Image (cartoon, rainbow, N blue to C red):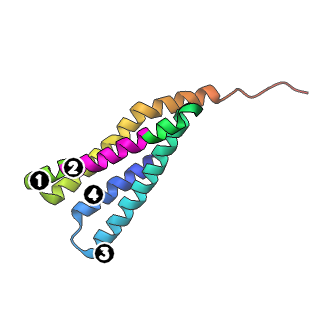
Amino acid sequence: MDPAILLFAAGLLVIGLARAGRTLTAAGALAALGFGTLMSSAQAIAVKMSPRHRVGLATSTFFIFLDGGMGIGPYLLGHMIPHVHYRGMYFLLAAAVLLSVGLYHALHGRMAASRGKRLTRPANRSVM
């Protein structure tokens, strides 16, 4: 998740800095690679964390919130543009995405780390 989040944030940052078509194309590639990987990984985590009989509910909830964010986000960001302009909006979005690294680790990282410790078993040291 971390590399995907960082690639997405880097893509948004480079979009904010872009002054030429090549830079914008490279930024789009970075953002697309990060966002695509991020969405696939997030859905996999949602499915993995849910009980088997709730996988359908987890998937639909994931997509409901994703679609809601895709609908409400541009509306809210459109109201920011007169105040911070497009360049500032992309910088703020990059900062928000970078903050999500901390949010991810606070909400899921600790849980995944503790689950990993529980699953690790000490090696059998008996000699045959």
Q: Nearer the viewer, residue 116 or 38?
A: 38
- Dividing the picture into quadrants, the one containing residue 126 is top right
Cβ atoms at labels 4 and 1 below 8 Å apart: no
Q: Viewed as shown, does residue 31 lie left or right of 92?
A: right
Q: What residue does disc 4 label?
A: 13
Q: Is residue 71 magenta?
A: yes
Residue 3 image position (x, y, % from top left): 44, 51
Query: What is the spatial separation of the Cα atoms under label 4 and label 1, in whole angstroms?
Result: 15 Å
Look at label 3 and name its amino acid. Answer: Arg
Q: Secondary structure at mark 4?
A: helix
Cβ atoms at labels 2 and 1 below 8 Å apart: yes
Q: Nearer the viewer, residue 115 or 57?
A: 57
Q: What residue does disc 1 label?
A: 84
Q: Viewed as shown, does residue 59 lie left or right of 120?
A: left
Mark 4 is surrounded, within 10 Å at the Cα level, by few (under 14), some (14 to 19) or many (20 or more) other residues, namely many
- 4 or 1: mark nearer the eye: 1
